[in-house]
Structures are given as C-alpha cells and as structure tokens.
Amino acid sequence: MKRILLLGSMAIYALFFNTSGMAEPASKTATLSLPFKSNSQWMLEIPSDGPVVYHGVYSLDEAGTGKGGMLYPAPSAAGLVAAIVTHALIINSAKNDQKNQLQLNADQVLSNYQEALNNFKYGELIQRTVDRVSIIHAAEHVKAQGYSDRKMIIESAPTFMLTQDQKTVIINDSIVIRMPGQTPEVAYKSLIRVISNADNSADSSLFWTGNQGENIKGISSQLHAQSIDIALQTFVAGKSTENKPFQTVRYREGLSDKVERAQVIHKDCERMLIKNLRGMFISAPVVKSVENGCETMTEFKT
C-alpha cells in the first residue's frame, strides 16, 4: 500500500514541479559557433542562425484551475493511485493550456517590435557577444586545475523577454561549459537570468525600436554577454557560493518589485547577483534606496 502511494506521489511530483525555473531549451538540430575574441581556443555555441527569440513577460499568478478538493472513488489502493494520476494529468494539461494562452496574450506587447526584430538573427547576436566577453580568468582557472583549455565550448541557449511596461529586457540563458576529451566532459551547467536596468524615457517602445532597433539589439547582446560572464565567474568560484545563507531579497523587474528567497552572491549600490531556491542565478537591479551612503539607480544605461 505504502509503495503504491509513494509511486503515485512521485508521478504527481513529476507532473507538477519544474525545478528549472524556466522552460528547457529546445533540442538543437544545428548550431552556430564562433571563437571568443579574447581567447580563440574557447568557442561560443548557440542555436542555428534563426531569428532571436523574444516573448512578453507574464505572471504565473494569473494561472490556475480553481480551488477545491476532489473525491477519488476507487475499489483498491491501485485504483486510487490511478484516479489521482489521471486527475493530475487532466489538471496539468489544463494548466499548460492556460500558460500557453497567457504567453500568447503577453506576446502582444511585442507587436510594435516585429519590424525591428525580424531581421535580428542569432548570427548577429553571437558576433556581438564574443567581442564583449573576456575568457582570461576562466582559462587561467582551467589551467590551474591541470587541464588544457584547448577546444573549450560554452553552449548557450538564450531567449529574451520584454516586461509589459516595456521598461526592461530580460534574458533567460541555459549555459553548459564542456571540456572535450576530459572526464566528465560537462564542467558546468546552470540557468541564468539577467534583468536589465529600466529604461527611463517617456516612450520606451520608441526608445527600443529607434534606429532600426539598435537599442533593443544592443541591450540584448549586453545581457547575453553578462549571462556568460556570470557563468564563467560561478564556474571559477565552484562550490564557494553554496554555503551562503538564504534570505529574503527584493529586486526590480521593470517598474515592479520582486521578492524571493535566495543566496546573495554579490551586491553593490546598483545591482545584485543572487541564486534562488530553484538554483537559478539572477542578476537584477536592486530596489531604489539609500544604503551604505549610496543611492541606487535603476535606469537603463547605454
């Protein structure tokens, strides 16, 4: 009986919980690679040269299928588990449908951006990124561990989001660092989110799309480079960040404040780097305040 109920519980957990904190990157049929400018032995690899993916931000608080309990008539323990799992499948399917609809609604915020973004391809993004990222410290770290840094590969699967107030661009990046020929080959894997400082112009849509979308392309490549910088920094730091205590932190996303439990990896007057309960690294503007003699600024800087 206990074994059956345990299996049912495990099935329900697998259905309902996504510990990644973001969607898993789609399987890649082709990739695009370029060497980093600061070290040509290290390669950046991203999805093939299609359009860069953007979405509108939506809140999971809007998703739900209603509250209330449910009775599970079943003649046996096995029948009870089957009823629970069937119900879980139905609820999970309904939640996925709701999320898909919420995403479609949220994506409408991008309606004025299509002309600027239609021609923005991953090839252009990767070219901008490899010129911004420094590999020096990571390469020194690999060599200090007794490994060769030849043919090091950083796999990146970036997607971007625009907040509904159109003030902030966000990157979600799934990053893997590989050391071909070494065991284990995967030296690092993490999910990283970087939230831009908010634009403070009167018309953010006009600001981002002006000059053929150069501002939104520029901040996107800047966020991509920052996500890789964070991956390299935490790769070098290793487990030294794991013992930091969890605390309640507040940060900015657009014109809104976000609150969650996280480890504070780094914080200064303007930004913080945290690791949340789902294991995702988040770099975000801190909430505006006067702290330690400095006033936090949150506007976008070119």
Image (cartoon, rainbow, N blue to C red):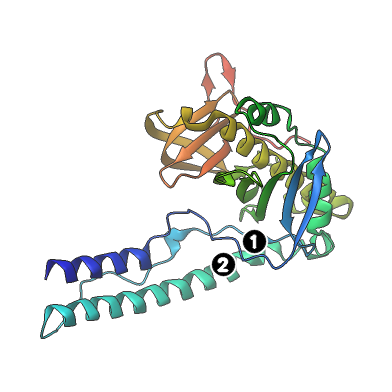
Q: Is residue 123 above or below residue 181?
A: below
Q: Do the residues labelled 2 and 1 touch (CB within 8 Å)?
A: yes
Residue 157 — which label? none
Q: Give the residue furthest to the right.
A: 211
State the separation of the CA atoms marked 2 and 1. 8 Å
The residue located at (60%, 28%) in the rendering is 145
The reply, left or right, for residue 107 in relation to residue 59 is right
- Give the total number of marks visible in the rendering: 2
The residue located at (54%, 27%) in the rendering is 266
Residue wearing tag 2: 103
The residue located at (63%, 25%) in the rendering is 144
x and y percent of residue 34 in the render? 81, 48
Name the element at disc 2. Answer: helix
Q: How crowded is mark 1: few (under 14 residues within 10 Å), some or many (20 or more)?
A: some
The reply, left or right, for residue 211 in relation to residue 152 is right
Which residue occupies the foreground of this view, 79 or 224?
Answer: 79
Q: In which quarter of the image is the C terminus?
A: top right
Q: Can residue 286 be seen in this view?
A: no
